[in-house]
Image: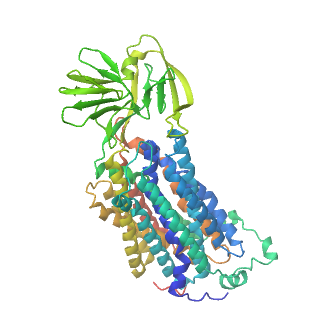
Amino acid sequence: MKTKPDLSFWKLWNLSFGFFGVQIAYALQSANVSRIFATLGADPHDLSYFWILPPLMGLIVQPIVGTMSDKTWNRFGRRLPYLILGAIVAVIVMCLLPNAGSFGLTVSSAILVGLFALMLLDTSINMAMQPFKMLVGDMVNEKQKGLAYSIQSFLCNAGSIVGYVFPFILTWIGFQNTAAEGVIPETVIYSFYIGAAILLLCVVYSLAKIKEWPPHVYAEYNGGVDTSKADAKKEKTNVIKLLVNAPKTFWTVGLVQFFCWFAFLFMWTYTNGTIAKNAFDTPETVSKYGITDANGEVFQAKYILINDTTVILEHGKATVAGFMAPDGSLTKVNKLSIERVNAPSIAVVENGLIASKEGVAAFDFNESIDTRDAKLSINGGLPVDAPASIKLVDYLTLIQQESKPVELTLAGIVTHDPRSGELFIDEAEVRTLNDPAKAQFATHIVLNTESKQYNDAGNWVGILFAIQAIGSVLWAVVLPMFRNRKFSYALSLLLGAAGFISAGYITNPYLLFLSFALIGCAWAAMLAWPFTILTNSLKGGNIGAYLGLFNCSICIPQIIGALAGGWILAAIGSPDALAPQWMMMVIAGVSLAVGALCVGFIKEHQPEAVKE
């Protein structure tokens, strides 16, 4: 087997440059997905479940891509065809995902669209990312692999920084950072659009600059067979056999990977909620997700109506029946404003809901509202004289006065054309409330995703993730200076563990820079050392297959973390209190510390050309 030649710095750079665009897409996904699904109406306890399908698809797709690319030879190359396909799908899906709440769908349908888009996005990003890892294994000698993966790590983190700060910069420029309930803000939507355009340009650059070795040259340098030969086509890669014959390094590095990726899944899922509450004091809101009857049965739906006509519960909010004067008289309203002398009118009720400013309710039910020296404007009509004070009454209060059973319609409501104002009942189910007097709202406490504080926190999470990426870039420069690779690997993970744990407690937005810089140290090691250690222990023509299988050590811990996240959050929290998402950051830190301890099980393959 011939020794692979040394490559110039710029050739090493070109092999990985496309990683910059791919990582922008990955950064936008990791920083904004929880924000997107929370805005669409997902419960915090369900957020982790939305991360199950992406790694599950990666678990299936990546080994297939790795194995197939080992046998692929065409005019575009060996690995590059998969880059092209993955990038095209990613660009399309990046334009779809942030618009999931803008199609006039029900909340459940919008979440399903977003989930499907997320699944495709994560799969396509990994498909586009995998060729760059394989190209280094194909074309770079062992002496230069450390440098090659360091360049890849640098480009990866540079792309991350760009992707993370997009929403913050667009807000600064003047794009809207808040939106109507269930709709993703402009800052997030246009960030995905710009990221898709940059990804496309990076792929074009990669195709122009990377020239893969032809089959016979590849065989000479990698100790394999020329897979372009007819007899080589008879050879098939047996996945079970590959796993049985995998070097011990494959399994020990995979063990470390398990605890690392488990931790980072929690970071991507719960950082938004943690920062929004701890550092930005986002207001809480009581979400009404259904009505409880006398037997404790919950009638749950995004919309609950009386006799298919009157909406009494709309997307977690009770609709207003009217205002009640001190004498007990009730006036039903859909729109209500208070007009004071020499002062702008104050909206009290709009479209049947209590008026709010930036997602925060301005009034509450049964709250006395002073209307002295003022007039009421009812249902958009002319002002009328008002009593000295009024109280808002919801429809459930009226239902409780009924002595006979009340039929409720549990439904979704959809509009096919938001401009028309036409609403249609969807997925309806009729239930009977036998004892209306004992009916209550079923509620839980969530962060107000419409509020300015929540969306400012969402932008700040991007800045914190950018700090993480900067810390990773700087630490990636330091990593090769350590003589003992395992020591630097374990140290990096311990620093990251400290960052996660501190992020769960710190309330100053700027002090969080330190936490996420420390997390960046762990990220740098996770990007550089696992593939360097593994590829040094692999020989022959199955490098792509092994790297595809090794991707399972990334996917499986994410799947387990996604399945366990909601259960853990419910176990450590209380049903009548805000979900303690900050505790999930602490658990992530503990997981990373366990990963650092597991580094001790790794036994590296030490080629003669590598000096430590």
The quarter holding residue 228 reads bottom right
* 400 vs 495: above or below: above
Total labels: the figure holds 0
Q: Residue at x 40, y 51 (%)?
A: 270
Q: Is residue 553 visible?
A: yes
Picture coordinates of residue 150, whole percent (x, y): 47, 77
Q: Residue at x 26, y 54 (%)?
A: 507
* 415 vs 68: above or below: above
* 119 vs 287: above or below: below
Picture coordinates of residue 264, whole percent (x, y): 44, 59
Q: Nearer the viewer, residue 451 or 612?
A: 451
Screen quadrant of the N terminus: bottom right
Q: Nearer the viewer, residue 498 or 326?
A: 326
User: Does residue 53 appear to the left or right of 291 in the view shown?
Assistant: right
Q: Is residue 552 visible?
A: no
Screen quadrant of the C terminus: bottom left
Q: Residue at x 79, y 78 (%)?
A: 229
Q: Residue furthest right?
A: 230
User: Does residue 507 appear to the left or right of 11 in the view shown?
Assistant: left
Picture coordinates of residue 13, whole percent (x, y): 51, 80
Picture coordinates of residue 182, whole percent (x, y): 44, 43
